[in-house]
Amino acid sequence: MRQAGPNPEHVPAAASSRVLGVGLAVLLLGTLTGAAAEPAEPRDDRASGEAALLDEMPVVISATRLRQPLDETPVSVTVIDRAMIEASGMLEVAELLRLVPGFQVGRSAYDPAIAVTAHGQSSAYPQRLQVQVDGRSVYSSVLSSVDWNNLGVALEDIERIEVVRGPSSPVYGANAFIGAVNIITRQPFQDRGWTVRAAGGDANTRSGLMRYAGSAGALDYRVSVTYDASDGFEGVNDGERLDGVSFRGVYEPGARDRLDIQLGYNGGEMGRGYPYPPEPNRDVERHYQYLRWSRVPGAGREGYLQLYHNYQRDREVLRDLTYTCGNCLLEGLTYDNGAHDHAAERFDVEGQYQVATGARLRLLAGAGLRLDRFRSELLTGREDFVDNLGARLFAQAEYRLGERWLLNAGAMLESSDIMDPEISPRLGLTYRAADRHSFRIGWARAVRSPSLLDNNWDKTYTDTRTGPERLDWFANSEFITPASLDPERLQILEAGYFGQWLEGRLTTDVRVFHQRIRDEIWLWRDPDYPECALLVGGNCLGDGAYLSDNGWGTDTTGIELDLKYRPGSRGFLSLAYALANAESDTLRGGAAVPGVNPARDANADVGTPRHTFGMLGSYRLPGGVEASLGYYYVSEMGWYGDGRVDPYRRLDLRLAREFPVGATRGKIELIGQNLDGEDREFSADNRLGARLFLRFSMKMD
Amino acid sequence: MLRRFGMGLLLVLLVVPVSSTGRVHRHLEVVLSGEDAIYTELLEAFRSWLVDIDTTEMTLSVSLADEVAENGGGNFDLVIAVGSRAAQVAAQSAGARPVLAVLAPRSALEPLRGRMRAPFSAIYLDQPPGRLMALGRAALPRARRAGMLAGPDLQPGPDAFRRVADEQGFSLNIQALAAGDNPTSRIRRILDDSELVLAPYDPLVFGTATAKWLLYMAYQRGLPVIGFSRSYVRAGALAAVYSTPEQIGRQTAEVVRKWLREGERALPAALYPVYYSVEVNDSVARTLGIDAPDPQVLAGQVDRLSGGGR
């Protein structure tokens, strides 16, 4: 519900070209180092022989690093693999989540945020999904949501996305409230050499990637430089021009240790998101550093220590808003002038240790410390940083009770300056009915801490005029947090089935669940807050405010289906479907208080879309052309604060062809999105018409 | 330590009178590539399987390859070279004496054959292709398509592998890998079309990080890898058939015993290991949805399918 901002002014961004320059320099450096250090791998004299057969090797697939087989996980997991990412023709990472049963993706008009949520119940800034890139959270305190536009990783560098549907704090950490999205990037060795990719098309979209991956001794590394620009929706100021550089290095000095280093920097300009001239007017800058040291001391044991730091800075200039009420005391009053400077950072350190004792028991335990800080005078009314220091402890056990039964138990204990200690437990039981057919039942409780912004709202406008006409008593609070908030609480009961058919070619996962959330944190409209500032002719001037408070409850019941059919290497079909029903009510401490939030109430009946469907199929035709088709449908849905959207229907088509280019191969793709007709995305202002893109890529080994 | 032992043995020889029973007394030299456990384990096993042989019939002298390289070989009836370095040194300095090279892969030993004037005998460390393929068949009874990487020094050559694949009912997709090639694109081609990956020992593939990548990429696709060593299984291969230094040591002892009875003609040109073990990675098997069979059971099946002796 971030309002304000009429004619925003363009802020020239110096950061953008700087990033590109730095990126190219790093790329060049990387190539030179690689070329210098990389002739034939050195071979041990004595070891061109028996050492390879008899010496120890680094454990690549450790028992505990193993994914749990899908028929044994206590939760439903949807995997979006590289083949699906390519076939989808999506140019944005967030859009890939349309392939997850029950997930909705909405490109909002504000900021411009991209909202990704499960079973609706969301504004433009959903906070209930934990999103990580290789274990590093990509959450922005300024948005109080996930910053999908600035993940710091190129689409081409993603190997797979694993989505856990359902709360899973014991494993995925705080904020894995309704689910967790784990973006796993490719190992540097997978893309050795140069890769170049360029795309262009409608909405003035231009994007490019240049990547080099090589090795220097025991270090495999990859450097990617990206550029993304687009005008976004027509008539909405949500364009962007972003460039970035990211580095990943994996260093394995011996058989037991592994060091994973990731660095990223991106920046540029983004629009503020209102129907104003489509010039981006917000200067954004992001960077992160990540380090994970893993050690496999022996068979069945593994631990890691991970540190990361995220930093973001947004600078924008908004012009004045002016009161025009035709002869009233506030006539001509201007407010919200200023250059706004928001900054946020997160420091996080986490350690985890896993043990697989024999074939029966697997244990995992860990602890972490996190510091979140954020400064935004516009949003908090303060010039200094607000911060929150938190700690967490978590553990999980998996125990085989015999041939067919598997018991899973876990819990996370969390505490911070904002939230008193809370435990989020989870229990699950899996029954393997037959080879590759299993049933499971689970129960979990989860807690979501109020975010820094939830707890520190103070967006108050004052009269910015400087002359004698200035009304110094005028204070129009738009968003306020009157008192400290309680955490949100969730309880869920779910049951599922996982089965493989047709000799493993068809995989099905069905999940039914009943979920209750209480003490939801929203912005509640209070027309009389703080007190009526001025009575003029019986009318209260000063619009009231939105108060950040707990007090909404939602019960959601649903069924999800995840189907994957892979008949051979020529193609695949993926189907995701969810049917859900939600009932919401204003509940403060259990008692209903109706009518307090008209915006929320108006959309409450469609806060959760009834049907969500996503289908993607791909087939390699004879002649070397690969054709893929995607179809996505979401029922009528209300995004809180932004109104209802008609049913969303989208047909995507993609044709791709590989061809030889000298000694290497190139690929050209024609991508058509939303070919079936115009839709509104997220709000009535965001009109999504048919879009065509052309993409070219080349890999040089 | 070994040198002292060798010296001690020589001392014993000088002090103890040699009884002439009419049997020829043979001096054997065992040259170890180094002091690592893999070599000493073989030596211990070798000795223990010949413990009944009287010192009047045979005596053993142990040295390190580096010493022999420096000082040249002594006057021995048979040189047993343990490891590829020892084999290289022995081939150079053996003169007319026969050499039995053990505990090194075929690709390391075969090139030395041409350099020798005297008989060169070898017990390879790597398994015959038939055995590897049989393990693939035993572990995955319904699979039809297999794939593998082949460097230029793969021994035996690709044709031998195709033949044994055919015998076990597999079609085999072999991707050639040359030094300087990008292995990951070759690996991808194998993975696109196979249900199982065969990983015999290949000096180009396994001297580098390629081995690691092969495991990782195969695992990402959910494809099992059948490998050539226990450590490869621990690293993530589904199963492997391999021979330990003890097992090679035992076989070496048997060859030497035969040689003591029958002389030089008993030395075989080359032998694959007779004794081998099978190891399975249960966790990987579970994740790939393969019923992890008992390694002993698998070994028995490999026996039968490959027609080889244990």
Image (cartoon, coloured by chain):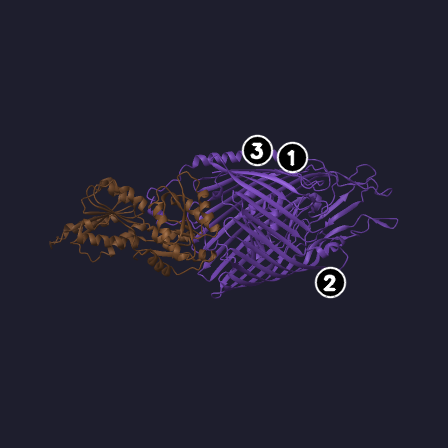
Query: Which labelled disc corresponds to residue A582?
Result: none
Name the quadrant of the C terminus of chain B: bottom left
Residue B228 in sight here: no
Mark 3 and mark 2: Cα distance apart in space? 58 Å
The amino acid on which the numbered mark 1 sits, given as a three-letter code, is Ala
Locate residue B104 relative to residue B185 in the image: left or right: left
- Which residue in the structure is indicated by mark 3? A21
Q: Are marks 1 and 2 on the same chain?
A: yes
- Which residue in the structure is indicated by mark 2? A591
Mark 3 and mark 1: Cα distance apart in space? 14 Å
Towards the viewer: A122 or A576: A576
Going from N to C along the chain, the mark reached first, 1 or 2, is 1
How many residues crowd around disc 3 within 10 Å: few (fewer than 14), some, or many (20 or more)?
A: some
Q: Residue at x 27, y 42 (%)?
A: B112
The amino acid on which the numbered mark 2 sits, given as a three-letter code, is Ala
Q: Vertical placement of B293 versus B98: above or below?
A: below
Q: Numbered disc 3: what chain? A: A
Q: Residue at x 61, y 61 (%)?
A: A512
Q: Position of residue A176 (x, y in %)?
A: 60, 54
Towards the viewer: A614 or B88: A614
Residue that extends furthest to the front in the rendered view of this protein: A622
Colour that chain A carries in the picture: purple
Towards the viewer: A607 or A319: A607
Q: Which chain comes out brown in the rendered image?
A: B
Query: Which labelled disc corresponds to residue A13?
Result: 1
Q: Position of residue A109 (x, y in %)?
A: 70, 44
